[in-house]
Amino acid sequence: MSELLVVELGDRTAAGACGSLLAELGATVLLVEPTGIARAGDSKWLRRAVVAAGKRSIVIDPGQRDDQALLRLALANADVVVTSSDRQPAWVGDTLRHVPDGAIRCDITAFGSSGPLSGHAHSDWLVQAMTGVIDTTGDPAGAPVSTRLPIIELAGAIYATAGIISALRVQRMQGLAQSVEIALFDCGVSMLATFLPAHFVGREPKRIGNHHPSMSPWNAYRAKDGWVMVCLGSDDHWRRVCELIGRPELATDARYVTPTDRVKRNAEVDRVVESWTAQRTVERCVEQFNAAALPSGPVYRIADVLEDPSLVHRGMVRQVVDPLTGAMVRLPGSVLRGNRVSGRPAPAVSRPDADREWVRSLAGIGRDRAATPASGSPKAVLNGVRVIEIGNYTTAPLCARQLGALGADVVKVEPPAGDLARPLPPLRDGQGYFFTLSNSDKRSVALDLRTAEGKATFREMLAVADVLVENLKPGSLARLQFGAPEIARINPRLVYCPVSGFGSDSPFANRPAMDTTVQGMAGIMDLTRAQGVPYKTGISIADLAGGEFSLTAILAALEYRDRTGKGVAMDLSMQDAAAWLTHVVWNGGPTGISLTLIRCEDGFVAAEASRGALASLGHGIVPDAMDEGVGSVPGTRRRELVDVLVEKGIAAAPVLAVGEVVMHGQTAARRLIVTGRSATGVEWPLLASPIRLSRTPPRVQRAIGGIGADGPDVMAEWLSAESAKPGQPGGPGMPQASNAATRRRSRADPPDSAR
């Protein structure tokens, strides 16, 4: 992407993070900094050093004609323009008229350009409230808990980056320019896959704190100097933990024999485990749990995250000088790691307006956006691309279903017993709703990779595939004779994307990892507390971030493959991805917004004000005796309180339950939950893609069928003599000539402050 110029105008955190990711991928990103920036609220400017790292900078005074002309010059040369139209002043909208028709425009807003909430410039926190994300977090007996991280903004940034790469691919291969739209509300709804199944079968989804709905012990336990997260999923785990804590008799106690028994007695099980952990340090607990091969991890405070051995080893925590203050600031390394190409971490922080003369040098370069659109209707982004997925639960399945929505032919290779998520309740005809939501637009093939026949078939499939994505434990495929070197030998053009808890290049590579333990080791639980207790976000944010980054990595690697003819082997880490979400708080400073949840007669309201400020309104809002982040107003309904607060200038929104989100007019207007059919005609509810492309939109249409149901069709299509190898003459996926504009070499140079 080194030939691309991205002009970043958006004020949202998502716009800044999207620009940073594009800079990591090699684009030249020009950060437009208006004069008189309000460095408050929840805008990206609260973290100017982090936002400006790795980018060029110009400062624009909209009242100065010379500055207006300079910005028009930058926009005239832009390949991509990133905005957040619900937050931008009028002069920005006027300036955007000068963006050429051939440029890709990406707009990131709270609610998108359609639906009853369109145009409302809600913060990330209020979007968390209105998408059910807050309501899914915390103890079921208490108030919901908000995370102080802008997790939906940052998810929106990753999806925006994937959308931009997709649009550039279509432009390169089909000669079509288009716009990209990312709505934070859409992103939030797309995160609810673990909670929607209960709604679909007529139940009310409930938050469960740090517990698991079907496994125990699974919780955060107090240690002498902090908290340790323990996630034990089997009867063998229970036996081993009983031996470890010196209570072997409990392994055969009739009260705790099965996972169901233990879940029914969670409180008793938790007391047993915590009586042991409370006598030891966090470090000692984790050391002993790991020695017994029991999934666990420390609940890090943010200061601990910055010194974590795996994150340090993988270069995820870096320090550079802020030229405005002379102080050192911490920046994240790149989550996008590959053997041939990786994301380029920001080398330095640009000074404001450091690149004014560089922008002037763009005058007279000229543009060659001439492109001949392909004949006929536009084709899907990944038309002709073949994807193999070997995945369980969330991470690889999420990535692959988004690739399927973008038009790839995705084949899910399952063992004869199927994906481990298939039987998770609630079920219909023996197939789980969660599994079906997680595996739309895929076909299932059953292979036993332990047999010679299964290995031979898999080898043939690899030879004609474009992408392999998997979330097995590191080394699992190598033990089956399909390590990265062998995969590259079979198909040198393949994009191979394994994603694991800590990555294969990590001191923790062999440590078992769950979403919850990774949340603890990324600092997310430290920022999601109630009465001092750390909570995981109800949505599986570490799994989700891993899947979102895998999607972006694969799309970028396909562009590299098409340009060079060389495949890429990635090494993605869920901990890297989850820690990246916390980088916005690594340097301290104000969070920008005081947050309070207010208990009403029919639920909670999220308000952007302190309890003290709310109490002074005189509307009967009183503080909660137990929780400093919660207030209450007896006898008032949510809608009434929101209206009062908004009238008084306080941003507020109702905290919606998952069922309310499903039935909301915004969800319906955006068609965020659609109906798909399996090959046999069975209808299932499915989640739409949060990526919106104006000319080649992702389409979610197909529900997956039974284990191996599509094997005969896939074998006939992929392995027939007539099926040419992707990327070879006559085969699918053959890249066409690039229409990218010619650039001066200086376009790809780093910012002046980084030289």
Image: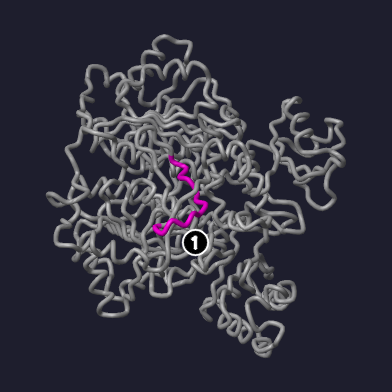
Q: Nearer the viewer, residue 560 or 149?
A: 560
Pointer 1 residue: 435
Q: Would you say residue 683 sits in the magenta stretch?
A: yes
Q: Is residue 102 left or right of residue 264?
A: left
Q: Is residue 177 left or right of residue 647?
A: left
Q: Position of residue 182 (x, y in %)?
A: 47, 37
Kind of residue indicated by mark 1:
Phe
- Residue in the image at 68% along x and 90% along y: 249
Q: Nearer the viewer, residue 648 or 611?
A: 648
Q: Quadrant of the N terminus?
A: top left
- Residue in the image at 56% along x and 68% along y: 297
First to last magenta residue range: 679-691
Q: Is residue 671 above or below residue 572?
A: above
Residue at the top extreme of this rendering: 65
Q: Position of residue 628 (x, y in %)?
A: 78, 47
Q: Secondary structure at mark 1?
A: helix
- Residue in the image at 29% along x and 80% along y: 451
Q: Is residue 501 left or right of residue 302?
A: left
Q: Nearer the viewer, residue 330 or 169?
A: 169
Q: Quadrant of the C terminus?
A: top left
